[in-house]
């Protein structure tokens, strides 16, 4: 059995469990290659940010289990998980990742709907008569 480092990343409703193995740079998300699971190039770029910043793209194979949320939220959750796993692997990578803001959990979430409104803040059209 191969030794690995595990970390969790979350964003909106998405939660990603990331495992970092020593390897050649292969990324698998929910048993699919990353370019199949995340079709948009932007999402692929987002989750590769921590690896590109630290220059470790070809050093690790990454296995991800992600659930909940949408594509964008999942990609951001995976990014946070990868950044946290890299720090567990090598504590010296913390400074560049923190400076780039990749270790901060994005706390923004959907605001709840209020009574009398159509959505969280959208009010029904005002009628004068």
Image: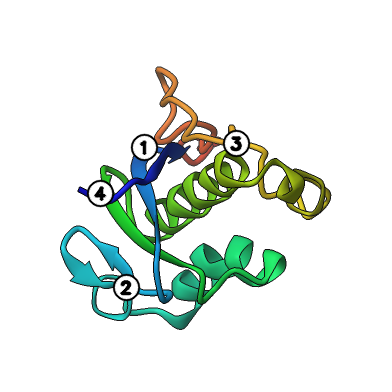
Q: Are marks 4 and 2 in contact (CB under 8 Å)?
A: no
Tell me the mark number nearer the camera, choosing from 4 and 3: 4
Residue 119, position in %: x, y? 42, 35
Q: Tell me how far mark 2 sits from mark 3, CA to CA.
A: 22 Å
Tell which tag, 3 or 1, sits nearer the viewer.
Answer: 3
Label 4 vs 3, first from the N-terminus: 4
Camera-side residue of 21 and 42:
21
> Is residue 119 shown above or below 34?
above
**Which is more foreground, mark 4 or mark 1?**
4
Tell me whether circle 3 and circle 1 mark residues in contact (CB < 8 Å): no
Labels 4 & 3 near each other (Cβ < 8 A): no
Q: For numbered disc 2, what is the local secondary structure?
A: helix
The image quarter containing residue 57 is: bottom right
Which dot marks residue 105? 3
Residue at x 49% of width, y 30% of height: 111
Which residue is identified by label 2?
34
Which residue is identified by label 4?
Answer: 65
Residue at far front of view: 1
Q: State the image coordinates of residue 20 (x, y, percent, origin top left).
A: 41, 53
Q: Is mark 3 on a helix, strand or loop?
A: loop
Q: Which mark is residue 113?
A: none
Disc 2 from disc 1: Cα separation: 20 Å
- Disc 4/disc 2 C-alpha distance (Å): 12 Å
Picture residue at 30% right of the left edge, 53% below the top: 64
As measured in the structure, the alpha-carbon distance from the residue carrying label 3 to the one carrying label 1 is 12 Å
Q: Which of the two discs, 4 and 1, labels the residue nearer the N terminus?
A: 1
Indicate left or right for 37 with 85 as reference: left
């Amino acid at each position: 059995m191969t030794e690995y480092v595990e970390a969790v990343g979350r964003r909106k409703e998405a939660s990603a469990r990331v495992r970092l193995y020593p390897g050649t740079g292969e990324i698998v998300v929910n048993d699919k290659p990353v370019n199949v699971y995340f079709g948009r190039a932007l999402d692929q770029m987002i989750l590769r940010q921590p690896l590109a910043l630290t220059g470790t793209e070809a050093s690790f194979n990454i296995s991800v289990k992600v659930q909940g949320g949408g594509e964008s939220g999942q990609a951001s959750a995976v990014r946070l998980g990868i950044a946290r796993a890299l720090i567990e692997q090598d504590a010296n990578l913390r400074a560049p990742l923190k400076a780039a803001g990749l270790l901060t959990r994005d706390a923004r979430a959907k605001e709840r709907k209020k009574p009398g409104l159509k959505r969280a803040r959208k009010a029904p059209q005002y009628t004068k008569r």
